[in-house]
Image (spheres, grey):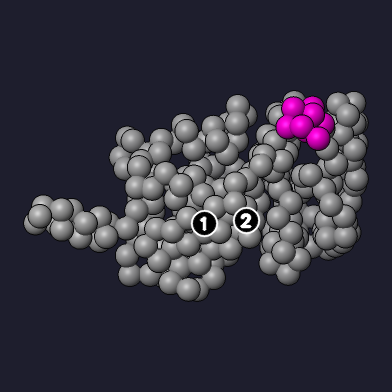
Amino acid sequence: MTEAEREKQTGLVLLVEDNSGIAEMVGEFLERRGYTVDFAGDGVSGLHLAVTNSYDVIVLDLMLPGMDGLDVCRKLRGEAKKSTPVLMLTARDTLEDKLIGLDAGADDYLVKPFEPRELEARIRALIRRERRQVSSEVYQVGGLVLDTATLRLTRDGEELQVSPIGLKLLAILMRESPRVVSRHDIEREIWGDTLPDSDTLRSHLYNLRRVVDKPYSKPLVHTIHSAGYRVADLDAEAEASASSAAR
């Protein structure tokens, strides 16, 4: 199947939502646009379906009976090792709430109430990103190593666990290292034309730094004011510059 043919496909969506009115509205809207939609009305059933089936996207409500969306997402990423894109629905719109959702493993979030067209656009963007072919490369910056084929990330030999969006973000920055990559270029490469709100990239970077940099003695992920972001080993750069100047 060609890339163009894949782009024309819609996809298989799991909707985990306990509000029957919202579930019916979203399901009918997506099905009219060619998606196949499975439903679950509680967290336990949703997790079971998510683990036992292969979905293109999981639309996951935060507040669910039995097991809330955060726990579903954590178990999906941790115990089940599933990388299926997760779009979390939440009535909470503070930055802290968004950080908690992304830290649990969600790829994107949408605050209720929402327009069905925006939900579908975000689903479409997640499917495009997931279907995009990823080159098999191994990137290394200092002690940080990312194998894009196996999605294994290590620093100083210790394996690190970050979200699928976090891995994509790191792949972009490590591929371009030590060059600075603008916020606009990062957002376009990850989310395409359906850009997230202004907190989303910042939230992913916060969570990424917490895993990649915080436990270690020197940071590798750097914010360049008014320019963008980069991954770089500043000590190695300084040594290389000094060596070059001494010649």
In this rendering, does residue 199 appear at all?
yes
| Image marks 2 and 1: residues in contact by CB distance under 8 Å | yes
Residue name at image x 32 percent, y 35 percent: 226
The answer to whether 233 is drawn above or below residue 120 in the figure is below
Local secondary structure at mark 1: strand
Position of 199 compared to 17: left or right?
A: left
Residue 138: give x, y in percent of width and height: 52, 56
Q: Residues within 10 Å of mark 1 (few under 14, many from 20)?
A: some
Residue 95: give x, y in percent of width and height: 52, 47
Give the dominant element type of the magenta stretch: helix, strand or loop: helix
Magenta span includes 48: no
Where the N terminus falls, by quadrant? top right
Q: Residues within 10 Å of mark 2 (few under 14, many from 20)?
A: few
Position of 188 compared to 49: left or right?
A: left
**What amino acid type is highlighted by mark number 2?**
Ala
Question: Which residues are the magenta region?
Answer: 1-9
The answer to whether 193 is drawn above or below residue 167 in the figure is above
Q: In this figure, which residue is indicated by the disc labeled 1?
A: 138
Q: In this figure, which residue is indicated by the disc labeled 2?
A: 149
In the rendered image, the residue lying farthest to the left is 246
Residue name at image x 74 percent, y 56 percent: 69
